[in-house]
Image: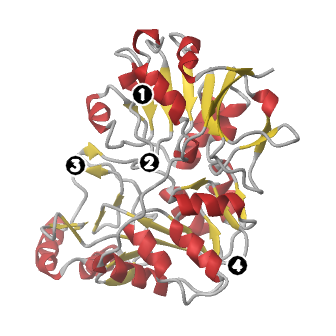
């Protein structure tokens, strides 16, 4: 039997030693989190470990701020928690999405789950809403499930469901679903997006991330036909392709990251199929998709073909996410390809993102054996099957012209 409570009563349920999973993306329970943040001495968060897969730029809670003795396990550094990640106050765990799911499902005891959900339907079933990614890994194993029932959360037709009776506690709320800001596309992103689009053919199934380059890529796909989507997330550019008929079939995703218009469309569209990370990022699933193309961004690519996607100057600024899962899935697909797309420079053109070798204080996100295509505003090259020296030459050609001479010199010194 579900017990309905107020948001500020959730603090009373937490006890030292508990591990609490907090849903992220559009399922982030913001009313409950706001109440926990404001509960002060009433919040028994001392010794409570909060675990969440937060989306940088969308989910902005540092759970360690709830209490001086609260603990947090994070898989992404965000603007809000990166200082505490660096200090060790937040325990950062570098894991790919599929590994995170397995960790949550099999290796981590969960005392409570807190998640935002839509209201139950007439049959007493509750949709997972427009974010299904990690929730199935923890629902059945948790001792308590606390649902923040938001009347603004959509109930898409093809999403997973749970019986309302599975909720031990529920909180009523009516507030906007979390959104992700739509990126501004500049000329550089547009040039990169155009080059990526040239590598995609009619009928291909794509996976794509979020940000200016993915948005520019989606905007450049308007001349392609019969595109399909199998992705960990959906962004606004996919909506336009689907409405315009470029993506006429079913769209398989795990979470929604975009505008209010996207949220409303996804909640009503018959095209959407929501599936958990155990399906969207699983190699057995991906290898069965012909012509699967993964499209992801990076911070740096070195001349060996190693990819850094989540650290800057030795500081954790994001997480590895699901990009490598998708890259490896594309390598298993018949006709599959993976693409890493990035600006050739950073810091207003003063720093090259094509580097001789990743710095000693920077971890590798994707191995040199994972790399396939690399795209910058200076072109696209497939380096997957190139020998070491040839791939270095190809990557130097993708660097900004003013850095190419220095890259050649440093590469020669690495090989001397």
CB of mark 2 within 8 Å of CB of mark 4?
A: no
Relative to 237, is 399 on the left or the right?
Answer: left
Q: Residue at x 81, y 43 (%)?
A: 121
CB of mark 3 within 8 Å of CB of mark 4?
A: no
Q: Of marks 2 and 4, which one's residue comes earlier in the chain?
A: 2
Write down the quadrant of residue 82 in the picture.
Answer: top left
Gap in angstroms between the C-alphas marked 2 and 1: 15 Å
Dot in front, 3 or 4: 4
Extreme-right residue of the structure: 123
Picture coordinates of residue 57, whole percent (x, y) = 39, 50
The one of 25 and 365 positioned closer to us in this rendering: 25
Label at residue 58: 2
Q: Of marks 3 and 2, which one's residue comes earlier in the chain?
A: 2
Gap in angstroms between the C-alphas marked 3 and 1: 30 Å
**Residue that badge 1 annotates:** 63
Q: Of marks 3 and 1, which one's residue comes earlier in the chain?
A: 1
Q: Residue at x 47, y 79 (%)?
A: 219
Gap in angstroms between the C-alphas marked 4 and 1: 41 Å
Which structural element holds mark 4? loop
**Residue that badge 3 annotates:** 360
Q: Of marks 3 and 4, which one's residue comes earlier in the chain?
A: 4
Relative to 58, is 22 on the left or the right?
Answer: right
318 in relation to 336, above or below: above
Gap in angstroms between the C-alphas marked 2 and 4: 29 Å
**Residue that badge 4 annotates:** 248
Specify the color scheme.
secondary structure
């Amino acid at each position: 039997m579900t017990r309905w409570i107020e948001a500020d009563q959730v603090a009373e349920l937490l006890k030292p030693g508990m591990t609490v999973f907090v849903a992220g993306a559009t399922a982030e329970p913001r009313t409950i989190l706001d109440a926990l943040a404001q509960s002060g001495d009433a919040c028994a968060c001392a010794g409570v470990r909060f675990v969440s897969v937060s989306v940088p730029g969308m989910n902005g809670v540092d759970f360690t701020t709830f209490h001086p003795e609260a603990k947090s396990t994070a898989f992404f550094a965000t603007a809000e928690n990166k200082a505490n990640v660096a200090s060790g106050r937040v325990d950062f765990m570098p894991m790919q999405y599929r590994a995170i799911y397995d960790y949550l499902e099999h290796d981590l005891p969960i005392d409570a789950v807190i998640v935002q959900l839509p209201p139950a339907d007439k049959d007493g079933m509750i949709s997972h809403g427009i974010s299904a990614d990690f929730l199935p890994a923890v629902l059945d194993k948790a001792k308590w499930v606390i649902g923040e029932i938001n009347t603004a959360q959509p109930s898409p037709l093809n999403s997973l469901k749970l019986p309302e009776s599975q909720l031990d506690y529920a909180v009523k709320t009516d507030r906007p679903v979390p959104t992700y800001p739509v990126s501004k596309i500049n000329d550089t992103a547009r040039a990169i997006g155009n080059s990526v689009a040239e590598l995609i053919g009619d009928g291909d199934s794509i996976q794509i991330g979020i940000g200016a380059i993915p948005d520019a890529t989606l905007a450049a796909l308007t001349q392609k036909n019969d595109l399909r989507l199998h992705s960990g997330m959906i962004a606004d550019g996919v909506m336009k392709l689907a409405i315009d008929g470029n993506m006429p079939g079913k769209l398989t995703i795990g979470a929604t990251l975009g505008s209010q218009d996207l949220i409303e469309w996804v909640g009503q569209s018959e095209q959407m199929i929501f599936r958990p990370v155990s399906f969207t990022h699983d190699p057995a699933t991906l290898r069965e998709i012909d012509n699967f193309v993964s499209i992801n961004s990076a911070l740096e690519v070195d001349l060996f073909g190693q990819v850094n996607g989540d650290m800057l100057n030795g500081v954790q600024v994001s997480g590895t996410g699901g990009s490598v899962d998708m890259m490896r899935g594309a390598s298993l697909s018949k006709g599959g390809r993976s693409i890493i797309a990035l600006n050739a420079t950073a810091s207003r053109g003063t720093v090259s993102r094509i580097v001789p070798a990743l710095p000693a204080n920077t971890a590798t996100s994707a191995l040199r054996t994972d790399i396939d295509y690399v795209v910058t505003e200076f072109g696209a090259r497939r380096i997957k099957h190139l020998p070491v020296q040839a791939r270095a030459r190809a990557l130097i050609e993708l660097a900004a012209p003013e850095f190419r001479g220095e890259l050649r010199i440093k590469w020669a010194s690495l090989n001397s």
